[in-house]
Amino acid sequence: MENLGVKRVHIIVHGRVQGVGFRYFVATVANRHNIRGFVRNCMDGTVEIDAEGPEERLQSFLSDIRRGPSYGHVDHLEETQLQPKGYSSFDIVG
């Protein structure tokens, strides 16, 4: 499968994002937008997301993540563009 047009972004999410089902929210949003990668909690209370897909879908995904779920709160995202890895699914890790 070619990765033409596929972008990848590594994200650290700051805010009230642990203990509120945030990883499940992210996985649901990723599946809705057909995004591949993973989400996991970090020891410092942030959430790490590694996501890839077509740029337009990634932007919609990021927009939904910035809004966050009603039961959590996103303060801000740290985003880093990376080379695509070719993920085949979106997984909750840990």
Image (cartoon, grey):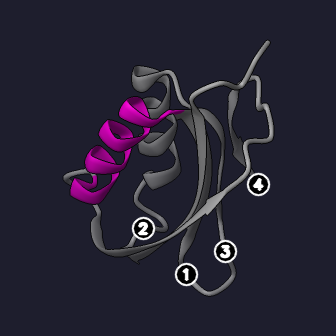
Around disc 3, counting alpha carbons within 10 Å, would you say few (fewer than 14), some (14 to 19), or many (20 or more)? few
> Which amino acid lies under the numbered mark 3 shown in the image of this protein?
Cys
**Residue placed under numbered mark 1 in the picture:** 45
Q: Earlier in the sequence, mark 4 or mark 1?
A: 1
Around disc 1, counting alpha carbons within 10 Å, would you say few (fewer than 14), some (14 to 19), or many (20 or more)? some
Is residue 61 found left or right of 91 in the rendered image? left
Label 4, secondary structure: give it.
Answer: loop
Q: Label for residue 17? A: 2
Closer to the camera in the image, 64 or 44: 64
For the residues bearing labels 3 and 1, Cβ distance under 8 angstroms: yes
> Which amino acid lies under the numbered mark 4 shown in the image of this protein?
Gly
Query: How far apart, in angstroms, are the residues tagged by discs 2 and 1?
Result: 7 Å
Q: Position of residue 78 (x, y in %)?
A: 47, 75
Closer to the camera in the image, 51 or 92: 51
Picture residue at 79% right of the left edge, 31% below the top: 86
Around disc 2, counting alpha carbons within 10 Å, would you say few (fewer than 14), some (14 to 19), or many (20 or more)? many
Q: Position of residue 28 (x, y in %)?
A: 44, 31
Against 73, residue 37 (above or below) is above
Quarter of the figure with the N terminus:
top right
Q: Earlier in the sequence, mark 3 or mark 2?
A: 2
Q: Label for residue 94? A: 4
Label 3, secondary structure: give it.
Answer: loop
Quarter of the figure with the C terminus:
bottom right
Q: Is residue 67 magenta?
A: yes
For the residues bearing labels 2 and 1, Cβ distance under 8 angstroms: yes
Picture residue at 36% right of the left edge, 32% below the top: 56
User: Quarter of the image holding residue 38?
Assistant: top right
Closer to the camera in the image, 45 or 87: 87
Q: Which residues are magenta?
A: 54-68
